[in-house]
Image: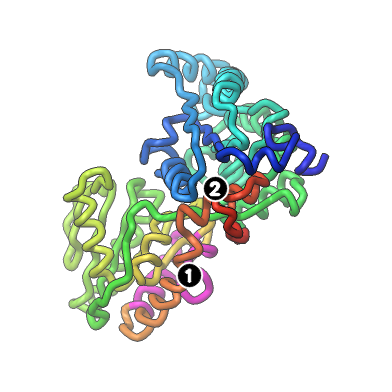
């Protein structure tokens, strides 16, 4: 079945679609408007669509807290593995029923499905959006790798059907897009890379490049490579005592020469948001050497601030950082991490790569992501603009 033949309110008449406002639903487990849902991705998409003049319908498939907990406990019971619960048959059926009801009420022209723990009505015009497939997650992610083989197999079978009914399967990066095609057999013409935008609106400023000042931002301290970074920085600081490192996130109580620990800073608090933006403005390099990084919105924020990044080679960071905007290193390769930090401690190298990162940053904004999602849905922009090309 071609894209144009899939059921939706727009399929019957393209001219009618242009006579009324375009309405797009964003469906997720968790309030799509909340910056805590999907690391702010859903809120960013809603903002981007609104900026384009698209009417949006945020649809939350969460149940009341006590019901949610009971459902997940029941779903995990057969294997006694709590990591199986989100992808279990019971969970999927309940979520899918909620999704069908919510979509019927929304009467949207198109639907953006966040994740694959539920199925939408097959006659809906929808796209899936993922930053990592289950096959990738089980292989490299410390949480999903704990799922039982039986639960993984059941979830995989449902995903194939969800992908088959989608108009387009969209991905945050080429890493995920390659898995959709290679691991799941989704035709390449039905896969589109849309990227993500920045949560903190850092801007490029004039900065002092003469003294290396590294910045790390990450809630999940272990997975984001925090311990490896501190060890590498200790060696760099021994060779260059003027070097500094600012650490934001969920780190344990720590003290180390040359390192300032700032803890978790919320983008919802203006004073803490200003601290984050100030640290981006003073940094000469962003570094987050994650064990796995499905996408890495923080790299987008670094590029927007005009600084290069050192990121993980496992996941999507290679796309975001680009060939000239920084360096990717393999997880747990501390010699390579130290070498990358030494290279970017050079002011001219950092400045040159920072300029390249800033040039790439406009590709990754929420309005551009929203344009690509509209294109994937086969919907026009309300103002008739030409939509951004897929990445």
**Front tag of 1 and 2:** 1
The residue lying at 27 percent from left, 47 percent from top is 267
Image height check: is 383 above or below 133?
Answer: below
Residue at 61%, 55% in the rendered image: 193
Q: Position of residue 96 (x, y in %)?
A: 60, 22
Image coordinates for residue 372, horizontal then vertical, percent: 59, 53
In the picture shown, does residue 359 fall above or below 48? below
State the image coordinates of residue 137 (x, y, percent, origin top left).
Answer: 56, 44
Task: Determine crowd level at label 2: few under 14, some 14-19, many 20+ residues with C-alpha closer than 10 A.
Answer: many
Residue contact between numbered discs 1 and 2, judged by CB atoms under 8 Å: no
Residue 304 figure quarter: bottom left
For disc 1, the neighbor class at 10 Å (few under 14, some 14 to 19, many from 20) is some
Q: Position of residue 170 (x, y in %)?
A: 62, 48
**Horizontal placement of 322 versus 122: left or right?**
left
Image quadrant assignment for residue 98: top right
Quadrant location of the C terminus in the rendered image: bottom right
Spatial distance from mark 1 to mark 2, Cα to Cα? 20 Å
Residue at 79% in and 38% down: 5
On the image, numbered disc 1 is attached to which residue? 360
Q: Would you say residue 92 is visible in this rendering?
A: no
Identify the magenta region. 317-344
Q: Which mark is residue 131?
A: 2
Q: Quadrant of the N terminus?
A: top right
Residue 298 appears anywhere in the view? yes
Q: In the drawing, what numbered circle is on residue 390?
A: none
The secondary structure type at the circle numbered 2 is loop
Q: Is residue 297 left or right of residue 266?
A: right
């Amino acid at each position: 079945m071609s894209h144009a033949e899939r059921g939706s309110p727009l399929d019957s008449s393209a001219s009618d679609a242009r006579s009324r406002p375009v309405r797009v639903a964003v469906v997720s487990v968790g309030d799509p408007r909340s910056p805590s849902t999907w690391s702010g991705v859903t809120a960013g998409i809603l903002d981007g669509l609104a900026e384009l003049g698209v009417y949006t319908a945020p649809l939350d498939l969460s149940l009341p807290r006590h019901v949610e907990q009971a459902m997940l406990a029941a779903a995990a019971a057969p294997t006694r593995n709590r990591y199986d619960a989100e992808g279990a048959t019971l969970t999927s059926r309940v979520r899918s029923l909620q999704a069908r009801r919510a979509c019927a009420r929304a009467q949207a022209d198109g639907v953006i499905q966040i994740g694959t723990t539920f199925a939408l009505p097959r006659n809906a015009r929808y796209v899936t959006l993922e930053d990592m497939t289950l096959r990738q997650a089980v292989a490299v992610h410390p949480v999903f790798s704990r799922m039982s083989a039986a639960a993984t197999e059941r979830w995989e079978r449902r995903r194939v059907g969800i992908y088959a009914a989608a108009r387009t399967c969209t991905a945050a990066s080429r890493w995920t897009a390659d898995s959709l095609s290679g691991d799941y057999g989704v035709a390449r013409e039905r896969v589109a890379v849309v990227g993500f935008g920045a949560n903190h609106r850092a801007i490029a400023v004039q900065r002092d490049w003469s003294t290396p000042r590294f910045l790390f931002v990450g809630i999940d301290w272990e997975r984001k490579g925090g311990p490896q970074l501190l060890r590498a920085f200790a060696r760099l600081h021994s060779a260059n005592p003027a070097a500094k490192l600012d650490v934001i996130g969920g780190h344990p109580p720590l003290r180390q020469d040359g390192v300032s620990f700032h803890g978790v800073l919320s983008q919802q608090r203006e004073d803490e948001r200003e601290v984050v933006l100030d640290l981006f403005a003073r940094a000469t390099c962003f570094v987050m050497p994650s064990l796995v990084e499905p996408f890495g919105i923080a790299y987008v924020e670094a590029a927007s601030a005009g600084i290069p990044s050192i990121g993980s080679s496992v996941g999507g960071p290679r796309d975001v950082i680009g060939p000239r905007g920084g360096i990717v290193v393999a997880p747990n390769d501390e010699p390579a991490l130290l070498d990358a930090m030494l290279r970017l401690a050079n002011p001219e190298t950092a400045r040159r790569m920072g300029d390249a990162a800033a040039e790439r940053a406009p590709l990754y904004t929420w309005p551009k992501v929203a344009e690509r999602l509209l294109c994937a849905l086969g919907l026009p922009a309300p103002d008739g603009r030409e939509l951004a090309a897929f990445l």
